[in-house]
Image (cartoon, rainbow, N blue to C red):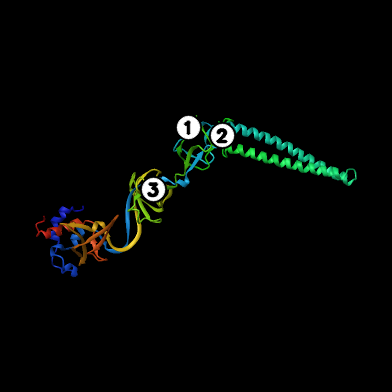
Amino acid sequence: MRASPVVFAGMLPLLLACGSEPAPDSATAALPSADTATFSAEAVQIAEFTYDTSRTVPWRAISRAPARLMLDPSSLETIGSITEGRIAQVLVRVGDRVQAGQVLVTIHSHEIMDARSRLANAISQRTATESGRTLATTALGRARRLLDARAMSRADVERAETAQVMAEAAYAQAISEYQRAEGLVHHLEGEGPSFANADPHDVLIRTPIAGVVTAREAQPGTVVLPGTPLITVGNPDRLLLQMQLGETAAAGVRVGSTVQFTLTAEPGARYNAVVTRVAPTLDTLTRTIEVIAQPSGGSGVGRAESFAQAEISGTAGAPSVVIAAGAVQAMEGDTVVLAADPRGEGIFVEAIPVRVGRRAADLVEITSGLAPGRQVIVGRAAVAKAELLKRRTGGSGE
């Protein structure tokens, strides 16, 4: 069972041997003796201190901002009307998962009937010109045989050759018209599974991609023109993290900066992302800069439109001495860290006055007072601080 700070403080007089050890260096000698204490091995074991070591690293500013997961705009497909007409059916709702080629909307339009009529005419014309071409080819062959037999004049053969060329041209034109008419019908019917309930007058609007319906502008009975937006489909597995940062906070953020974020619905889980875009201009209304990051983990990150809290690491700057934020303590108006040096099986603790600079997530910049490489107490530092405060007040415990 873990001892509480109050119980532990009452045991300190029995577990501490104070003032019996010399100061470890000149910096310690400059401090009042009341700001030092030697903790025995038993006291350290009961206190369960945790430690960090001051170190010099390139400083990275951390910006915190609310964020939201959104569908990657490049994965969104806005499907519009391809004809003029009246919407007959809307077959999907927002949130429905759809497959490529699936019919989403039907539009009652005379254009499809006109296209089918032109296709029928084109088929008829293709058949007629194909027969004419065959006949012309046969006639030309016969004329050439007769010419060889001196039973037909050269002029008659030339006329047969001309007729054959014209038949070929007529057939080529018929094929072109047929392909054009067939392409229009195919365009209006779409490519995909057949739709049993389709009316002959209905143009079929299909989705070219698989995904989830994210928006539905189409309403039955509405008259639409070509290009009118009807349905938007997106890939739910392609998500981006969107953040809005103030001008100062965004100053150190670059493409490639790392981001850690937690979802509001899952505060215990942390996810990683990498900045892929920093807007070049400020938003004129909010005076913020949009930052977009690509989460790691794909579809396992969360759902689109989920809210999150993000921490963005800026670019590395000049080296600074840093320690864990929990190591910085306030002692009667002084800002100190509690350095812990080994003394036999125990530790020698001294409160070192420091100046702190920038803060980022779990780190604090130390601008003066602490050299790199010093071990400091982080976890349960309040227990050691309580004993040092007691010594400042002459052992009264206040």
Q: Which quarter of the figure has residue 36? A: bottom left
Query: Does label 2 or label 3 sit earlier along the sequence?
Result: 2
Amino acid type at mark 1: Gln
Determine the residue positioned at 41% across, 45% down.
70
- Judging by the rendered image, the residue that carries numbered circle 2 is 203
Front residue of this view, candidates 71 and 346: 71
State the SS at label 2: strand
Q: In the picture, which quadrant includes the C terminus?
A: bottom left
Q: Is residue 378 visible?
A: no
Q: Which residue is mark 1?
A: 219
The residue that disc 3 covers is: 242
Answer with left or right where residue 124 lies relative to residue 41. Answer: right
Q: Secondary structure at mark 3?
A: strand
Q: Earlier in the sequence, mark 1 or mark 2?
A: 2
Residue appearing at x 78%, y 42% in the figure: 164
Q: Mark 3, residues whose alpha carbon is within 10 Å: few (<14), some, or many (≥20)?
A: many
Residue 11 bears which disc, if any?
none
